[in-house]
Amino acid sequence: MTENSLQFLVALDHIEPRIWRRIQVPDNYSLGQLHQVIQIVVGWHDSHLHEFQFKGTRYGEIDPESEEGVLDEYNVRLRDLKLSVGERIDYCYDFGDNWQHQVVLEEILAPVPKAVSPTCLSGERRCPPEDVGGVDGYADFLEAIGDPEHEDHDAMLTWAGENFNPEAFSVTEVNQSLRRRLRPAKKR
């Protein structure tokens, strides 16, 4: 079966100005593979649980000790969802910080010979640091790093890294990271 490419807009909810990425992935990718791509392009480190929801069905990592009703994200290909342009998949990362993302299908593209996939086409702003405390914690963090007189200014910059810039985003660096981290396994 010929694989098409799916173009998604991935946007982090409840943060202004918006943090978003436009990506293309093969339609034969599983939801688990889409999760890996989102982690890289948004800038998370995949150190927390996550879940997709689409049309009332939940998909995620299967844990026999966790609650029932979650289907294995690696058993569902994006093409199997039969998405239409404009439809949205909800994606939650880190159930404690509760980072909600909208993953909206923008286009279904015909195969392109020798195309590099997945790829990030564009985006804006850096994602919040892991474990910052969700939307409210991120607002407090930005306030602290933005005010050299704030009592937590130095501690927050040390914790997040002295060079943390919430406006920074480089599509080139993201694509380099995709190539490096999603490199196919060598055949033996």
Image (spheres, grey):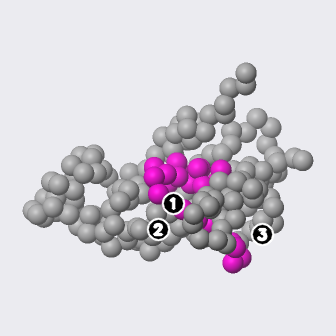
Q: Which residue is mark 2?
A: 95
- Asked if residue 13 is positioned above or below residue 119 in the image, the reply reads below
Q: Where is residue 136, by image quadrant?
A: bottom left
Q: Earlier in the sequence, mark 2 or mark 1?
A: 1
User: Quick one: SS at disc 3?
Assistant: loop
Q: Can residue 123 be seen in this snapshot?
A: no
Q: Amino acid at mark 3?
A: Ser
User: Quick one: SS at disc 2?
Assistant: loop
Q: Earlier in the sequence, mark 3 or mark 1?
A: 1
Q: CA distance from mark 2 to mark 1?
A: 7 Å
Q: Residue at x 63, y 46 (%)?
A: 119
Which residue occupies the extreme top position in the image?
Answer: 188
122 is within the stretch colored magenta:
no
Q: Earlier in the sequence, mark 2 or mark 3?
A: 3
State the extent of the magenta-drawn residues as a range. Answer: 33-58
Q: CA distance from mark 2 to mark 3?
A: 28 Å
User: Quick one: SS at disc 1?
Assistant: loop
Which residue occupies the extreme right position in the image?
Answer: 1
Q: Which residue is mark 1?
A: 49
Q: Amino acid at mark 2?
A: Phe
Say whether residue 38 is left or right of residue 139. Answer: right
Q: CA distance from mark 3 to mark 1?
A: 27 Å
Q: Position of residue 130 (x, y in %)?
A: 38, 56
